[in-house]
Image: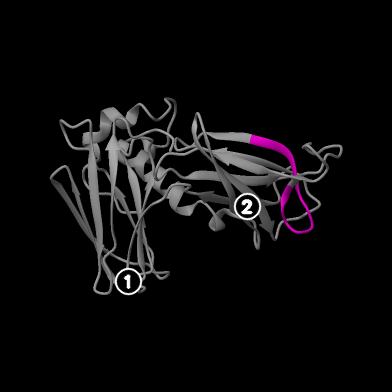
Amino acid sequence: MVHLPHRASSLLGALLLMFPSGPRRQEDASVEGQVERLAKVQKNWGSKMNSPGAAITLKETRRDRTAQGTAVYYRLSASGLDKDAVYTLFSTSLGLRTTPTLAGVTFDRSGVAVCAGKQGTCSGERPNDPNDLAVYAAKGEPKRFGVVSGDNEHKAFTYVVPFPILGKDRGCTAEAILLTAKGEAVLIHGSGFAPGTDVHFVGVSEGEPQRTESKANDEGDFYQVALPYVKGKSHGKLKVTLESNACSPSLSFEWGEGTDHNQ
C-alpha cells in the first residue's frame, strides 16, 4: 500500500496544472486521488506488468556532457520475450503521457534490442544495430520504458533513475523518486528492512514536520508519499529519515522553483 500524509489539499494550485482536463474516474477526481494514482504507477512499474516470464533491463553504457545537460546512454536487453516478434518501444512521462519512441524493434539471440534493418523493422547505421537510448533527467526523475509486441501478446516494462537521491544505513536504503517535476509529490521507497518491521517516516520540510508509522512489506520494502510544499514558500528542502530498530537511512532533496532541470 502507498501511504499519503494528510497535506494534499495545500498542493491544489500546483498539482492541478499538471493533470489534463477531461473525464476522470470518481476516485481520481481529487488531488489526493491524482497523487495516489501517480504513486501507484511508479510503485508497480516493472515486473508486475510484464508478460509471464518476461523482463527487460537497461544497462548504462556511457555519459556525455551536452548543451542540454548530461546525456546518459542505456542499452536495452530482454529475457523471456518472443525474439521472433516485432515490438514498439515507448516511454511514459511523469504526467503519465505515453509516447511511442521507436517502432520495429526486435531482439537478437543474446536478448539485446536492435534495429534489424529488415522489412517491417527499424533501421540503424548497420544491420542489427543496438537501440542505445540517450536519456536526460533531473535529480530523482524516473525514466519509464516499455516494449509491446504488435499483437499485444508480449510486453515488458522497466524504469531507471539516472541521478538517484539515496540514503543508506546498515544495509537499508531510502530513495526519493519524483512523481511531479518540481517535487510537489515524491515517492519515498525504503528497501532492505526486515519483513514486517515497524518503519517510522520522519520528514522536515522548511521547519514543518511530517511523521507517519507503518510496516515494511513481505519483501522488506516501505513506500510513503511525501508532499514537501510549505505554505508561503516557493522552494525549499525536505529531509527524510526512515527509522527502524535495525537501520535508519536518511536523505534530503530540494523542491520547488528552479529544481526541474536536467543534470
Q: Position of residue 75 (x, y in %)?
A: 64, 49
Q: Residue at x 70, y 51 (%)?
A: 154
Q: Quadrant of residue 196?
A: bottom left
Q: Position of residue 199 (x, y in %)?
A: 26, 66
Which contiguous range is marked in magenta? 101-113
Residue kind at label 2, given as amino acid type: Ala
Q: Position of residue 202 (x, y in %)?
A: 20, 57
The mark lying in front, picked from 2 and 1, is: 1
The residue depicted at 76 percent of the width and 55 percent of the height is 82
Specify the farthest residue to the right: 119
Q: Which of the 4 quarters of the picture holds residue 46?
A: bottom right
Classed neighbour count for the residue bearing mark 1: other residues with Cα under 10 Å, few (<14), some (14–19), many (≥20): few
Q: Nearer the viewer, residue 60 or 198?
A: 60
228 relative to 261 in the view: left or right: left
Whether residue 79 is in magenta: the answer is: no
In the rendered structure, find residue 241 and report the number of the disc placed on it. Answer: none
Q: Which residue is mark 1?
A: 170
Residue 84 image point, x, y percent:
81, 52
**Dot 2 or dot 1, earlier in sequence:** 2
Figure coloring: one colour
| Residue 173 horizontal side relative to residue 42, left or right | left
Residue underneath mark 2 = 156
Prevalent SS, magenta region: strand
